[in-house]
Image (spheres, helix red, strand yellow):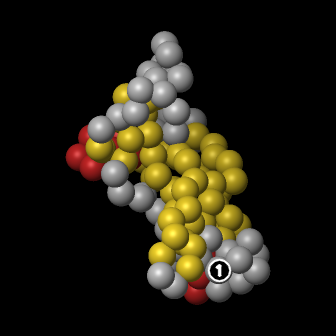
Amino acid sequence: MVYHGVRQTASGSISRLGTALLDPARPDRCLLRSDAWIFGPEAAYEREGDVANVAFPCGYAIDADGDRLNLYSGAADTSVALVTRRIRQLLSWLDAHGGGAADAI
């Protein structure tokens, strides 16, 4: 699962994306959650706009190969971006960067 989170900083809010792995048999149980964000506002169109420093998931599609994730992301409430990643790479990254899982989300 890709989720949206907001962090308050000294210079204002910053909105980023994280990832979590849910139990397929019990999706109310989180098996692993990233302790770092996987995507955040970096480019000017993500940092400047109607709402600055915002990146949030709008939807996704999985390619026919079953491994390529096409993630559509809002940017500063003025643009939509397309981020592509391999699902196996995201799972590998999550395995390396996952923190303690919450019992429920």
Choose between 43 and 84: the one closer to the eye. 43
Residue 81's image quarter?
bottom right
Residue 79's image quarter?
bottom right
Residue at horizontal 42 percent and vertical 58 percent from the top? 38
The residue pinned by badge 1 equals 52
Q: Is residue 104 above or below residue 85?
A: above
Q: Is residue 6 above or below residue 24?
A: below
Q: Is residue 43 at least partly visible in the picture?
A: no
Choose between 102 and 81: the one closer to the eye. 102
Residue 30's image quarter?
top left
Q: Is residue 43 above or below residue 86?
A: below
Where does residue 46 sit, x and y in percent of width and height?
61, 77
Q: Amino acid at mark 1?
A: Ala
Tell me if mark 1 has few (under 14), some (14-19) or many (20+) residues whose alpha carbon lies within 10 angstroms of its own: many
Residue at horizontal 23 percent and vertical 46 percent from the top? 96
Q: Is residue 5 at least partly visible in the picture?
A: yes
State left or right for residue 85 relative to residue 44: left
Q: Is residue 15 above or below residue 87?
A: below
Local SS, label 1: loop
Where does residue 28 sit, x and y in percent of width and height?
53, 23
Where does residue 48 sit, x and y in percent of width and height?
65, 85
Where does residue 16 sit, x and y in percent of width and height?
52, 63
State left or right for residue 81 relative to residue 14: right
